[in-house]
Image (cartoon, coloured by chain):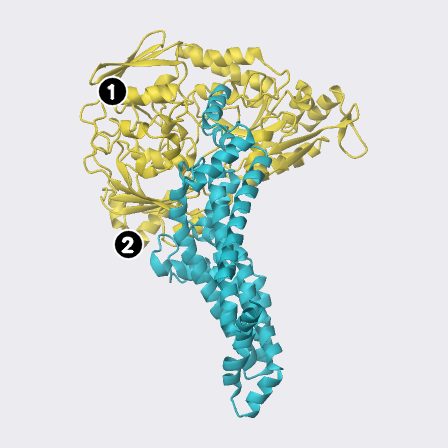
Chain colours: A yellow, B cyan
Amino acid sequence: MPPRNHFRPVRTSMALFGALAILTGASMARVEAGTPVPGGTLIYLEQQAHTNLYPPAGGFYPNGGVLNQITDKLTYQNPKTLKIEPWIAESWTVNPNKTEYTFKIRKGVTFSDGTPLDAPAVAKNFDTYGLGNKDLHLPVSEVINNYDHSEVVDPTTVKFYFKKPSPGFLQGTSVIGSGLVSPATLSRKFDELGDATAIIGSGPFVVTKAVLGKEITFAARKDYAWGPANLDHQGPALLDGIKLIITPEDGVRIGALLAGQADVIRQVQAYDEKQVEDQKYLVFAPSTRGVNNSVVFRPDNPLVGDLRVRQALLHATNAPEIVQTLYSPNYPQATSIIAATAAGYVNQAAKLTFDLDQAKALLDAAGWQPGADGLRWKDGKALILTAYESQPQPQNKAMLQLIAQQWSKVGVKLNVLAGDSGSRAADDLDPLKTPVSPAMVGRADPDVIKSQYYPANRDILRQKGGQSQKVQTFVDDKLNRLLEGIASETDEAKRLAIAGEVQAYVIDQAYAIPIFEEPQAFAAAPYVKGLAFEAVGRPSFYGVWLARH
Amino acid sequence: MTRYLIERIGQAVIVLWAAFTVTFILLHVLPGDAILIKFQNPDLGLGPQQIAEIRASYGVDRPLWLQYGHAIGSFLSGDFGYSIQAGVPVSESIRANLPPTLWLTGLGSLLAAVIAMIIAFAASLSPFAWLRALVRSAPALFVSIPTFWLGIALIQIFSFRLRLLPVIGAEGWRGLILPVTTLAIPISAPLAQILVRAIDDVATRPFVAVARAKGATHAWVLWRHVFRNALPPALTVAGVLFGELLGGALITETVFGLNGIGRLTQDAVNNQDAAVLQAVAVLSAVGFVVVNLGVDLLHPLLDPRLARKERVLS
């Protein structure tokens, strides 16, 4: 059984649970005994259908839920310690410059199509993820920076070369986006990789049947013998299989779980947690350990170009009220731009105070005077901002509306738009149309900060020369230099120090207002044992067993 | 009749072409496009240069007329392209999603017709005036029930409380009972309303009085004479209700977690998945054309006067 205490089973009174187990008698006796019972099929309800299953697109949680069962990774990131441990790679060496990584591949590993998972296969995987494949439309993986080429030293040794130091690569080999797939899968077109049966991995489960938009059937691989070396559970998965069923309605997912029609569900809204726990079912809320759920500014828009305006809005935001009103203790209030459990975290809470007087004073100082209509005005312009809601984030619309309410107390209006995906994607590139945006990313490595802010990556602040042609002037060279440092500093202690500097700098510049640390919320029936999550909250059913089936 | 059919098929081809072209134009007028939505998505975390390369490789920034020519050319040759969002060929998407929707809507409209007929007969045959009035108010109630609410209520009662029918992983007919009922009830309302009014209308005609005078029972007259004459208006409405049926199917599919054309369309609209929308638009146009052609061909069978008129005219 894999370690289970890295998640937070919230407000679950174990005493009560124990009493219930005794009361219900015989059927629960096996649970108390704690010996894994193999067999059975787990019913897992997912809110959204998966999209393209090309592993680097696994960041989308519905995709990750599928890929995490069918693919293995070169290394395993221990979700408790965040240390990198052996998995398909038995061992590795890195040169001091962090430009050459050599991995020793475990012997006897095969993909489910029978082809061996050896050094050439690993090389092909990372050549594709590191460089992309234009003919097949396969894009580059976000987690691999500065990739140059691979070299197959012998059938069990593969070496990767980088153009510049790439200290984040080792952790990058453990993430969902670096799942290893058969060369046959990588020779398909990107446009065909939404077919779950086409994704041939070496994982503990295999997709046996997929009905588009409805369900996926997984069967355990009986010959699986290469799980992460440090897990308690070894050998094939305990379950016979998994049935993943798409159930878009929140109420139907929870109702089905409580009525015994499902065993595990993903996406439990904060307001539904009580209902689940009242029935002695379990809520799991593993942290996504990355960039916190935040509101960011696009300083290229003159309305938020002034540091004092951004600082005023930061102090006008009452994050504790947001967390208490909309969320639960599973959503800890943010104290930096990254989660407290993330690598390199430095507490910034002292700068994130809610202070209306300070906010008003800052707006006054910036020349924004209160008008008769309650709004702040300057040079004949009112301080009216716009943000699009982000649907994948929990209750994002309600959150933005609450922020709008809070900002209105200092005379700033925030329009919250739903919008169709097309308008959102197009307007999101234009700082004049979206001066404010919600943001979050999950990944347990300081590289995630660079991913989020660097102009050549996600470019969340919208800098000139980044994602958008519409940006006029805004560039922050100091920020960019720091971010490059995170991605290339070879000394780990120095790298974490830079990550700390970036956190302080982003808050000092009030580029982002961190709100809460985003979890992935799951619920499971009490007889589901051994449910585990990878470092950023994707479920693993490898060690799961059903105490009743 | 043959000439009539040829004309109708000619009209159908124009309708299909128009559906394709209008969809194509609308999709290009909208801000953003499928490639932007897919690859700008933070889940992929791609940089600006990578996105530019992908846009070029898909040729989305070519001149509009070139894209249109390419789209219609491949469409005619049976290549419907790929769903950018889902990463599967559109033909496969349609193949997976069309049969469940046909079952759902087919059975749903059948049940709606049965419910409408029961209401119509009960509205005329019920023994007491208060009962007839009650039955007559049923359509107004049915039409005002939101589909998603009805679906969730049925699930809560019959699946989660009484545990009679599973919602999750339900196979075959057991899985269809609740969704079909959910879809049928709101659709049955307008049908029932038209039928009740038409029956009232026909019942006052002289030939009904004659039949009654000859000694026929009320029920027999209703079935043999009145109902048959009241059917054509209801049938016409049934053709128009097809659109409502697709809308209801979307909500029913979402609530019950069924795959189908409704949800496929919703996802495609959300993501401006052009290839899928082109195919769905043409498919729906085919549906409309077939249903309305069927209704038109059925009319003369129900009402011999229409057939005679046609013969006289031709």
Quarter of the figure with residue B236: bottom right
Asked whether the beta carbons under mark 1 and mark 2 sit within 8 Å of each other, the answer is no
Which residue is tagged 1? A120
Instruction: List the single residue furthest toward the top.
Output: A97
Examine the rendered structure and indicate whether residue A532 appears above or below residue A169. below
Chain assignment, label 1: A
The image's mark for residue B168 is none
* Residue B168 relative to residue B200: left or right: left
Type of residue at label 1? Pro
- The answer to whether residue A13 is visible is no
Mark 2 element type: loop
Residue A131 or residue A171, whichever sits in front: A131
Determine the residue positioned at 27% across, 53% down.
A27
Q: Which residue is mark 2?
A: A25
Label 2 neighbour load within 10 Å: few <14, some 14-19, many 20+: few
Label 1 vs label 2, nearer the camera: 1
Placement of A352 over or under A207, stated as above or below: above
For badge 2, the amino acid type reads Gly
Q: CA distance from mark 1 to mark 2?
A: 54 Å
How many marks overall?
2
Of the numbered discs 1 and 2, the one sitting upstream in the chain is: 2
Hey, which residue is sitting farthest right in the picture? A372
Spot occupied by residue A388 in the image (x, y as percentages of width and height): 59, 34
- Residue A306: tell me if it is visible: yes
Horizontal side of residue A226 vs A298, given as left or right: left
Q: Position of residue A45 (x, y in %)?
A: 39, 45
Res. A380 image quadrant: top right
Q: Give coordinates of residue A41: x percent, y percent.
A: 28, 47
